[in-house]
Amino acid sequence: MIKRVSVFPRIVVLSITVILVLCSPSLLAESAHSPLRVSGSSTLQPLLDRVAGILENSSFGLVIIEGGGTTMGIQDVIDGVSDVAAISRALHADEKMILSNTLIGFDAIAIVVNERNPLSEIGRADLVDVYSGSIDNWRLLADWSCPVVLVTKEEGRGTLAVFEAYSGLYSNKGKDVSASMMISPKAIEAGSDLEVVTLVGGIPGAIGYVSYAVASVMRDKGMPIKILSLDGITPSAETIADASYSILRELNLAYIEMDARIAALVDYLLSSEGRALIAEQGFLAPSEVDER
Amino acid sequence: MNLRKKIGLPYALFGLVLLVFFVANYYFINYRYAEIVERKSSVERIHGNIHMIGEKAANSILTSDAGYLVRAAQVSLEVHDLLAALKEVDSSLSETISDDFVDFYVHTIALSTLFLEGRKQERAAMLEELEQLQQRIYGDLHAHMQELDDGYAATTRLNNLLIMSTIGAFGFVFILVLFYVVPRHILKPLQGPIKFAKEVARGNLQAIPPSSISKDEVGTLSTALGEMHSTYMITNSLLSLSLEDEPLEVLMKKAIDQILSISWLDGQGRGAIFLCEEPGVLTMKAERGLAEPVKEACSSIPFGFCICGRTALSGEPHHASDLAENHEVTHNGIIPHGHYCIPIKSSDKVIGVLNIYTKPGIPRNDRQESFLTGIANLLAGIIERKQTKEALQKSAEQRAHMVENAVEALASLVELRDPYTAGHQRRVAKLSLAVAERLGFDRDRAAALRLAALVHDVGKIQIPTEILNKPGKLNNLEMRLIREHPTSARNLFEGVEFAWPLAEIIYQHHERLDGSGYPQGLSGNEILLEARIMAVADVVEAISSHRPYRPSLGLEAALAEIEKNAGRLYDPDIVDICLKLLREEGFTFEE
């Protein structure tokens, strides 16, 4: 009885010590790091959600993915609210002075209309007339009488910046531009790509511009939209890869300083597994573009 | 227009209008109901869709699953379609409802995608705005639903009003027919025929038949009653013809006039009656309205010739609707006509033909033909009776003539034996006849008196000539023999049947008014009037003529004798007549 009593505390203490030693690095690591926060482009949000799920599963720690748009993502990183900004365009020069970035792929901007719209293609000039408001009814472009409902992106969205660059039109918010150079103030301002797609799908006369990846995925899920050919080119993996499609953009992740978890995230995205996931989301991984 | 049409037509017309009205009403109302129901269901569906979109957004059911967004877009498109369709038929729908819905949709989707992006902080403000938008749309829809409900109720009221007014109109027509058409077109016009029928039923054959110009059943009844009456009157007067003591030709003429006056025979007021007086030949006995050439051609028709002849030959009624049918007698300018030729038959033997001209083109009519056949039977009765009567009369006359001849032969026989007596009897007969005529005797009675006078002294045949012609006074025995001669004559004629009591007249011709005569000593009115006449005539002639036993005493002596004894021996009236005849009227005994 006594013997057994004397032996028991030692085993217990030893065992606890061993377990504590074995467990300490991870315990320390967990407690030393807050969750990895990623915010910004809604275009990249579905992809990042998937990646976050995969990384969390491998004891990477929590990953919080938020939208809000490219500009908000950059601001969040500068403010220290987020660790990584998801950016669905190229970084501006001034941004590059503060942030480092990794190109993780390419995306196209698709011009989408409601599936009832008989139009199947559009040129840049007509697109500009539509968005500036000078074409306000579809009968001017097709055999269909229906008022045009514009869906545009709110300020700070990467997609808006790319569209502005392509069309030469500017969002009316806080920019001093002439009316003919402005996206019609009647346009509905949407946030995320899904919102654009859903609005265009639910309003017969609507037109919007949105990530090709999101548009094609949602269309395939039954959203009543149609992706128009632009300047005679139909967006597809091929036309995006050979850059014959007009509106292409970079997809970047930006951060102030690379750390182990960011590196792990970037590395995963650039791995063959990550590239497959990118392709699955309708984007093009950088190497594919390079190869061509 | 008959009564069925008068009463049925308003009902039928009204029924047709009702039917059309009901069918139109049914479709109209149903169309309205269907339209309203469809709109209501659109509104309900819009309401449901909005609710679904809104509820999902409000209850944060959203996940990263894009299924909801796809569904929301599809539902939104449906709402767009429903609203567009509603606005086309419903101007009352709020103008802004489509825009409100787009607003609502945009907000809902914005809110939903905020969730997707994880931006929860902006949610509360948006939810509130969303709620307001949704209520605004619901308010519009509710107001519109109310309007549709009102429309539904109004349609129901209209339907009820239409049905009630239809029933009311039907009731009005029903009452109109019951209280106006029936009394005016049936009950009132029936009064005349009813009154007439009652009058006739009570035996007033002189009742005036109802006159009606209406062409319905009541009019037909009135006309039929009138025809019945006139037919009855004509038949009646035809029957009474047979009682008239007129020659057959006169009766037939009257009969054809009566028959032609029957209105419903479709006659032309022309016709004829033929009688068969010698075998195989018809002789026209009476006609009316026949053209001269026809009268001449048809005055005598052999059996088998023309329609009348064939009728007589076959004994069957013939009808021709116009001249073309076997009308062999014709002439220029013959007036078109048809014929009924009806045989007049007496116990299956054709005794004549009744021929009635009808208007051309009138088809054979059983009613007319059987009526005429009845008339022909009536005529047969009249003719038969008349002919029988005439035959009887003739035979009676023949017999009287025979008796007369026999009596005259007897008188001649007396003449052979006693010329004086013979001449005496003739002259007495002549005077007696003259007196009888003055007294108004009919032919037979006068003839009987004359015959009696012709042979009143035939009894003297039993008296020896010596006594008869003995000049001078007769002794008692001789006188008794002489006074036997009335009795002898009576015995002689007792067996002779005659219409008048010939034997008795002769037997009494020596009786005197005061009873002093012989053989029976009758007096006054016991003596036959004929005997009293003969007594006067006998005395006048005897005194005024020569006798073998004495010369003529002269007419005046004779007249003086009767004048003196008028009222005592002789009937004073008869004496007066004799005196007047012989003195004033120049009566003479000479032949």
Image (cartoon, coloured by chain):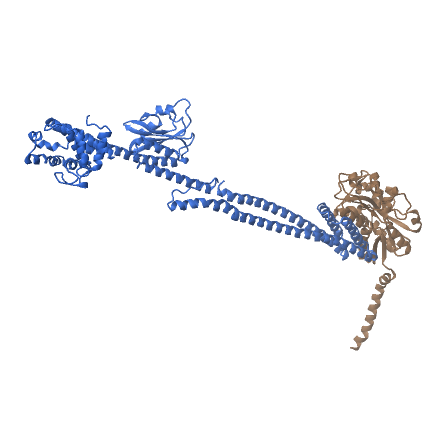
Chain colours: A brown, B blue
Looking at the image, residue B430 lies above or below residue A221: above
Depth check: give the residue in front, A49 or B74: B74
Q: Residue A30 appears in which quarter of the rendering?
A: bottom right
A194 on left or right of A32: left
- Residue found at the far top of this picture: B332
Q: Which residue is at the far bottom? A: A2
In the depicted structure, whether residue B116 falls above or below residue A109: below
Residue B405 visible, this angle? no
Question: Image quadrant of residue B524?
Answer: top left
Q: Residue drawn 52% across and 43% down?
A: B9
Where residue B1 sits in the image (x, y, percent)?
A: 50, 40
Residue A84 placed where, x, y %? 87, 53
Locate residue B120, reporting x and y percent: 82, 57
**Rendered-image quadrant of the N terminus of chain A:** bottom right
Camera-side residue of B521 and B265: B521
* Left or right for B384, reference B365: left
Image coordinates for residue B373, horizontal then vertical, percent: 34, 35
Quarter placement of the C terminus of chain A: top right
Please identify the quarter of the rendering in which residue B329 is found. Answer: top left
- Of B467 and B341, which appears nearest the observer? B467
Residue A87 appears left or right of B415: right
Q: Along the line of sight, which residue is nearer the eye, B191 or B71?
A: B191
